[in-house]
Image: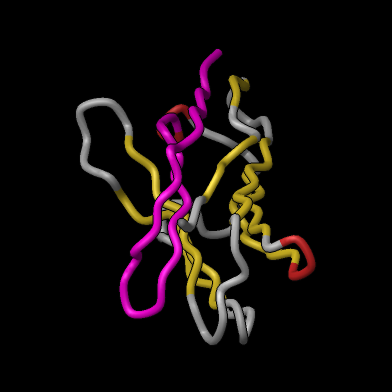
Amino acid sequence: QVQLVESGGGSVQPGGSLRLACATSTRFLGDYVMGWFRQAPGKAREFVGSIRWNTDTTRYADSVKGRFSISREYGNNTVYLQMNNLKPEDTGVYHCAAGYSSYDYWGQGTQVTVSS
């Protein structure tokens, strides 16, 4: 059974940084995508960014461009979300997901709170 486990969440002040990690229990084969999503209280889940494993191609939501970056560590099947210049509106539960044509596997999420 495929498992994705997020870590690295916490509480920071506006302008601060956090780095989230998503470790997978298995090495996916082929050209799959790993994505990050977030959900704030009372709001729908939204796409944050993604990385295509084979090409290292990344995509980001407009709201995080220039502040967030996604990278991967091939050897340990881990994807990172580096978040800089955090804003209160970045608060939410951050989930990683993986799949090929759709996101079939999801982690439980890690809480990020940005508050002064």
Hey, which quadrant is residue 83 in on the image?
top right
The quadrant of the image that shows the C terminus is: top right
- Name the colouring of the figure: secondary structure
Q: Residue at x 62, y 69 (%)?
A: 27
Q: Is residue 39 left or right of residue 56?
A: left
Q: Nearer the viewer, residue 62 or 79?
A: 79
Task: Point out residue 51 in the picture as x, y percentages from the top left corner.
Answer: 55, 71
For the residue pair 88 and 55, the one nearer the viewer reads as 55
Between 45 and 22, the one lying in front of the other is 22
Give the extent of the magenta segment: 91-116
Q: Position of residue 9 (x, y in %)?
A: 59, 30
Residue depicted at 50% across the width and 51% down the height: 3
| Looking at the image, residue 38 lies above or below residue 71 | above
State the predominant SS element of the stretch in magenta.
strand
User: How far from the left and from the top, in percent, is residue 76?
Assistant: 75, 61
**Residue 46, how many percent across, how many down?**
31, 50
Asked if residue 109 lies in the magenta stretch, the reply is: yes
